[in-house]
Amino acid sequence: MVTVNAMGKLCPEPVIMTKAELDKGATEVTVSVDNDIAVSNVTRLLEGRGFQVELQRNGDERKLTAKKVGDGPVPSASQGGRLFAVLVTGKTLGRSDEELGEVLIKAFLGTLSKLTTRPAVIAFMNEGVKLTLAESSACDHIKDLEKTGTKVLVCGTCTTHFGITDKVAVGTVSNMFEIMEMLTGADKILSL
């Protein structure tokens, strides 16, 4: 059994540390973290690699014990024949006129959700994470994308910075490693 001590480590370090051990061939691993976002991120990595995961809490420590039980696919943005990804880093489309920018981002996401070929992944970072809140005029369009198979990733560092992690209404609160893995797996990246 391999042990990974990621206590006190910020996103995406717990995922990177765990992945390093998996890449070495670990089939049983225990990962110690100290926050729920790390629990979620590391669990997704492990389950995606075919591990069964159990969680134990002891004070601030959250211990994930995992054993390989199958072959999980390594995530790729090109799965299912979709070859592009979208990175959204702002709550508006364009920067000079905020009111117009809000109208444009809503129209962009609404149109994106209606296309025949939708992105495999759409990742929200920086102020873009605010679009995933229930009060965002674009939230329903993002939900439509998610319902039709687009993976929606929301930067956990960003939501923590803005104090909105518990208010995210669509997508998965994620980490830089998972976001980069999905974006770099795409043939094309559209960055807003």
Image (tube, grey):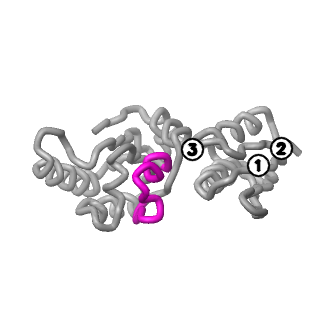
- Depth check, front residue: 130 or 51: 130
**Residue bearing mark 1:** 31
Q: Residues within 10 Å of mark 1 (few under 14, many from 20)?
A: many
Disc 2 secondary structure class: strand
Residue 134 vs residue 117, the one in the foreground: 134
Residue at the location (49% across, 41% down)? 179
Tell me if I can see residue 173 in this picture.
yes
Element type at marker 3? loop
Instruction: Return the disc, 2 or 3, that comes first in the chain's sequence.
Output: 2
Would residue 23 be found to the left or right of residue 164 on screen? right
Residue designated by label 3: 75
Q: Is residue 44 left or right of residue 78?
A: right
Identified at 39% across, 44% down, the residue is 125
Q: Who is closer to the viewer here, 118 or 182? A: 182
Marks 2/3: CA distance? Answer: 24 Å
The stretch of residues the image draws in magenta is 156-170
Residue 21 in picture, x, y percent from top left: 76, 36
Instruction: Give x and y (percent) for residue 162.
Output: 40, 52
Asked if the residue under mark 1 is in contact with the one under mark 3, i.e. CB atoms within 8 Å, the reply is: no
